[in-house]
Amino acid sequence: MLIVLSLLGFMLIIWLEAPGLVKKKMWRELVAFSVFLAIGIALSIPQLLGIRPFEPNAPIEALFKPMAEWLKEP
């Protein structure tokens, strides 16, 4: 049910914003709008399904954690 509501919200945003961008022939803005909206959908749907999204800090933490542990040792 939450997924349907989320998708309806995204559709409402598209319905409100996209026609103005097309009418004004703002193609670059329409592309940017579409990309950010797609990212928003791609991040929200897995979260609503209970799937943890990719954590960008995980690889950085895995890289630097051993060095931090080594530096902590007396």
Image (cartoon, rainbow, N blue to C red):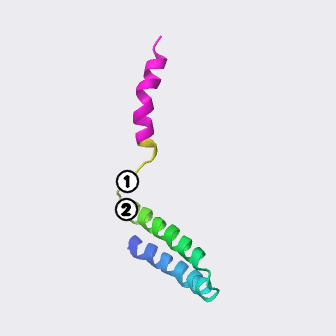
Residue type, numbered disc 1: Arg
Using the numbered discs, state the Cα–Cα distance from disc 2 to disc 1 in whole angstroms: 7 Å
Prevailing secondary structure class for the magenta stretch in the rendered image: helix
Q: Is residue 23 above or below residue 44?
A: below
Residue located at (39% from left, 66% from top): 45
Query: Which badge, 2 or 1, is on the more N-terminal residue?
Result: 2
**Residue 11, labelled with which disc?**
none
Magenta stretch: give its range: 59-74
Residue type, numbered disc 2: Pro
Element under label 2? helix
Q: Is residue 62 left or right of residue 25?
A: left
Q: Is residue 60 above or below residue 49?
A: above
**Which quadrant is the N terminus positioned in?**
bottom left
Does the segment drawn in magenta span residue 7? no
**Residue 46, labelled with which disc?**
2
Residue 18 in the image: state x and y as whole percent.
56, 82
Mark 2–mark 1 CB contact (< 8 Å):
yes
Residue 39 in the image: state x and y as whole percent.
47, 65
Element under label 1? loop
Q: Is residue 69 above or below residue 5?
A: above
Front one among 7 and 28: 28
Front one among 59 and 16: 59
Residue 56 in the image: state x and y as whole percent.
45, 47
Does the segment drawn in magenta span residue 70? yes
Residue 63 in the image: state x and y as whole percent.
41, 33
How crowded pointer 1 is (Cα within 10 Å; few <14, some 14-19, many 20+) is rated as few
Front one among 1 and 49: 49
Query: Which residue of the protein is positioned furthest toward the bottom in this rendering?
Result: 23
Q: Quadrant of residue 5?
A: bottom left
**Residue 52, labelled with which disc?**
1
